[in-house]
Image (cartoon, rainbow, N blue to C red):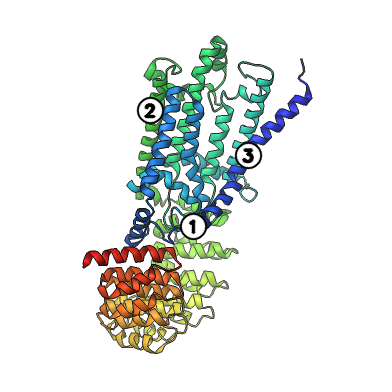
Amino acid sequence: MKAPSGPLVVLILLALVFTIGLTFASLELPRLLDGILARTIDTPDVATGLDAASKYKTDLYLRATRLRPIGYACLAFVLVLIVIGFVTEKTGWTSAGAIALFLPVFGHFAATMFFLGGLGFLRLLWLPALDASFGLFRLADIIRLPYEAFRAAWSWAGLTRLLHPAAAITGLGLLVFFLGTLTWFYARSRKTVVADLWIYRLSRHPQYLGWIIWSYGILNLPAGRIKICYELSNSLPWLLSTMIIVGVAMLEELKMGRACGRVYDAYRLKTPFLIPMPRVLVRASGLPVRLLFKKPYPDRKREIAAVLALYTVLILGMSAVHGVWASRPIARADGSPARIEELARTLKEAPDRSAKRTAAGFLAEAGDGAVDALAGLLTDPDPIVRAYAAGALGGTKADRAVPRLIALLGDADPYVRRTAAESLGRTDSSQAVQPLLTALEDPVQDVVNAAVRALGRIPHPEVIPVLIRALRNDDWGAAGAAAQALGEMGAEEAIEPLIRCFEESPTCPYDRVGTALRQLGSDRAVDAWIAGLSRAGWWYPRAFCASALGRYKMEKGLGPLQDALKDESPQVRRAAVLALMEFRSPATIEALRGALKDEDFEVRLYAKEALKKSEEHE
């Protein structure tokens, strides 16, 4: 009997509502939530995981806001929710716990310098694991292999320009979810006990399958505003939440088996559990269950728990083995002609820069054997290809790469010329000195700066006088590169020119000049940093100078540091407070008390801690 068209239209609309809600949760909700959290929750402007100072700021923020106990309590609540739902077979509770575990994955959409900034605040739930190690979540990175294979096929088919592969996966998940929801509604409207039509003939749990595919796409979607200098993997949270969802599906199998008996058993025999696969693969994937329980399906809750634990451990074990294997140098530096040809083709033809950079890095590791392949790319019409090839040539450390890089100093594209200059510095070849000296006359300042940096890496007697002259360059980048190189080379004849630089030049790179003088053993480094604290035009060198005065506990800098608490830049005021904290001097207490009223919450946070340490010191 044909179903009435009216009810079917209603069911389609209901399924669409559910799917649109999931789409909103995928794309628009993260953006809105990120904006709300960024405006309402103060988080430090800290590159978490970068260095010891960043770790200290992070720990201080967590202690001051008492986020650790909150995060631990949240995780405990979610775990209790999952366990209670599993024990009582109230699958809604367990599903809610699984979704809660997955929610922090959305943090990568708007990654900020601080790992709890903006939408990253959802990661509070994972804080106990992050306290142990930021690398802990890489334990399940093997789950990314299917995506890498799909991305390669997607790129090979030329579809990347149309749609990102992760977005395609997300869309597929939404489609499966929509079809599963529609079919379930339709079966319920017909009073069908066991839904065995439409998509339910391909999967016994299409809604859960749709959620898993959708979440896998979300996991691999590129971040919109990456500002982090560390990479926080989300593979383990995805694996755990997915295994919990699989457990929910297994619990529902128990209920259906008890309620429908042989009818459901017959349906189960002819329809895959989740993923439509050939029968051979279905039997292979279920082999551990048959070996463990001597039956095709677990029919008790403790058996389901054992199955979930077994498969989770297997995946984690394979991931650990894969991680060790993938990190072996021999696996990353395959210098065979076929491999080099493949990488060169990727560098030339890959549609996204990430793939090009990766290929260029592997070609650099291949050494001399990759020089000819890279040289063939130096005339490519795409300047990005030429630049990446030039960068890889410098990494090969091959002598015969030098003339090819020298020729690129005359390339029409300034980015290519800059990369060629930087690569020549990495070759350490004296042949590069004269061409790099000529590059100092390039009309593009970025190329000049790169040439100065490159000269600083080449041990040659002609280099030091050139670098000393570069200290008088009006461009901050060129003079800074020269100062850094002179300090690292131990060029004591540069001490007086460095002093003249910070005393006379209004564009002096005070931060690098002070560092160079410190490396050369001059006590005038403190004067360079004090001068930079008040004269540098950009906040970054002023903040660096403040930090340096505190790091080396230079008493002469106490007064200037207190004055810096009135600097217009909050970054400089933060650096000044942290520097004053190092002295723990009674002379700074009044200035620090004034900083407690600063408009910037980080300045207030650090001032409070500095006063506490000063009182302890007394």
Q: Earlier in the sequence, mark 2 or mark 3?
A: 3
**Residue 174 coordinates in the image, percent (x, y):** 62, 37
Which mark is on residue 310? 2
Q: Residue at 30% of width from left, 76% of height from top? A: 489
Q: Are marks 1 and 3 in contact (CB under 8 Å)?
A: no
For label 1, count other residues whose C-alpha is less than 10 Å away and answer few (under 14), some (14-19) or many (20+): many
Q: Which residue is at the front of the view, 273 or 180?
A: 180
Viewer-nearest of discs 2 and 3: 3
Mark 3 secondary-structure assignment: helix
Q: Earlier in the sequence, mark 1 or mark 3?
A: 3
Check the image and report above or below for 510 versus 152. Answer: below
Q: Earlier in the sequence, mark 1 or mark 2?
A: 2
Q: Residue at 39% of width from left, 72% of height from top? A: 543
For label 3, count other residues whose C-alpha is less than 10 Å away and answer few (under 14), some (14-19) or many (20+): few
Q: Which residue is at the front of the view, 178 or 498?
A: 178
Q: Residue at 43% of width from left, 67% of height from top? A: 401
Under mark 3, the amino acid is: Gly
**Inter-mark Cα distance, 1 to 3:** 37 Å
Under mark 1, the amino acid is: Arg
Q: Which residue is mark 3?
A: 21
Mark 2 secondary-structure assignment: helix
Q: Which residue is mark 1?
A: 357
Left or right: 426 in relation to 589: right
* Residue that sits furthest to the left in the current view: 618
**Inter-mark Cα distance, 2 to 3:** 34 Å
Viewer-nearest of discs 1 and 2: 2
**Inter-mark Cα distance, 1 to 2:** 38 Å
Check the image and report above or below for 500 versus 298. Answer: below
**Residue 168 coordinates in the image, percent (x, y):** 61, 42
Under mark 2, the amino acid is: Leu
Q: Is residue 35 visible?
A: yes
For label 2, count other residues whose C-alpha is less than 10 Å away and answer few (under 14), some (14-19) or many (20+): some
